[in-house]
Amino acid sequence: MSNLQTNNEQIEKNVINLTVKLGILLLLFYWCFSIIQPFIIPVVWAVVIAVSLYPLYLMMLPRFNGKRGLTGTVFTLIALAMLLIPVFMLSGSMIDGVQDLSKAIEEETLKVPAPSADVKEWPVIGEKTYTAWHLASVNIDEAIVKYTPQIKAIGKKAFSAIMGGGAGVLQFFISIIIAGVLMINAEGAVKAVQSFVVKLSPKYGLEFVSTTSATIRSVAQGVIGIGMFQAAFVGLGFWAVDVPGAGLWALLVMILSIAQLPPFLVILPVVAYVFTLDDMSTVTLVLFTAWSIFGGIVDGILKPFVMGRGMDIPMLVILLGAIGGMIMSGILGLFTGAIVLAIGYMLYTHWLVNDESPAQ
């Protein structure tokens, strides 16, 4: 009886010791996670950027005599310039535009051209757009007074968008620098990731790593790359017919394309606006319309040739993962969603093969 009591007491001590150790370990993990939490998103973006652009880094490496540090530094500076130069140009253009608009309103020199009667025929928004546009062309002061609540609401949303955009630029700035460091130390980083994943899954760990990197490149090329190409293609047409703010409309096309929304939400109103202009010839209108329509569907033509190329994962799985991930987690979800669904699909296929093997 005493032995049984001694054993019970020893078990209780062991349970208590194990519980305390697990509690302290969980507390330590939570503490570490809280410390690194602000850096998780920039680091994940850095990994995405590094994996997507690593082939370009390897192409640059021989030009710098194989010096990884120098190549990574130059690559990072180029990437930062590509990020910051358009931001500064757009910011300067916006500031100049706001200053010119404020000056014109103060000096009462702002003139809004009268709308064409065809504006009334625009679906859903035609009548309201024509009324507001006509009032602004006749009496800009009265239009400002009448639509002050709407102007304030738009101003607040625009300010929030600008602040969010500034935070996003800062995040990408940090991510690009981290990505440069990762590319310089790519071999060590890959070995560390492989060791960790193999520890989790000795049989499929290396395949997980290769699938993840291939999925990131597939999404980068098939979603972001095609979105940028589509925006450039459509924007060239806008610029050719001198659409006001052509660059901004092209940027919206790119955002819609990346978000897997129809770019025609921007293209069709711009085409309708061009048709209201009196100085456009019929040939120009036909060519511009055909160019814009083709630009709106070019992503659907190119994606089957880009997404999933060189992978065993079907394109539909990658695309569904990207769309679902974006709905859940924003732009970053394009990559994380595609990766998770690709790995899930791979595990599912392996499970089917293993399950069927005894019967064969």
Image (cartoon, rainbow, N blue to C red):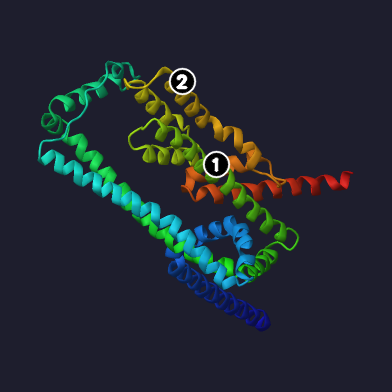
Residue at x 12%, y 27% (from the top left corner): 139
Q: Quadrant of residue 81?
A: bottom left
Asked if residue 135 is positioned above or below residue 340 in the image, the reply reads: above
Residue at x 17%, y 28% (from the top left corner): 136
The answer to whether 197 appears left or right of 259 in the picture is right
Task: Name the residue nearer the viewer: 116 or 165.
Answer: 116
Rate crowding at label 1 as few (under 14), some (14 to 19) or many (20 or more) other CA atoms within 10 Å.
many
Residue at x 34%, y 51% (from the top left corner): 89
Identify the amino acid type marked 1: Ile
Mark 2: secondary structure: helix
| Image x and y of residue 132, in percent | 21, 25
Identify the amino acid type marked 2: Val
Task: Name the residue nearer the viewer: 233 or 265.
Answer: 233
Which marked residue is nearer to the observer: mark 1 or mark 2? 2
| Image x and y of residue 54, in percent | 60, 59
| Image x and y of residue 294, in percent | 53, 28
**Mark sitting on residue 338:** none
Q: CA distance from mark 1 to mark 2?
A: 25 Å
Earlier sequence position, callout 1 versus callout 2? 1
Residue at x 51%, y 61% (from the top left corner): 46
Q: Which corner quadrant holds the N terminus?
A: bottom right
| Image x and y of residue 233, in percent | 49, 36
Task: Name the residue nearer the viewer: 35 or 47.
Answer: 47
Mark 1: secondary structure: helix
**Mark sitting on residue 226:** 1
Q: Which corner quadrant holds the C terminus?
A: top right
The answer to whether 17 appears left or right of 329 in the picture is right
Residue 41 visible: no
Rate crowding at label 2 as few (under 14), some (14 to 19) or many (20 or more) other CA atoms within 10 Å.
few
**Mark sitting on residue 286:** 2
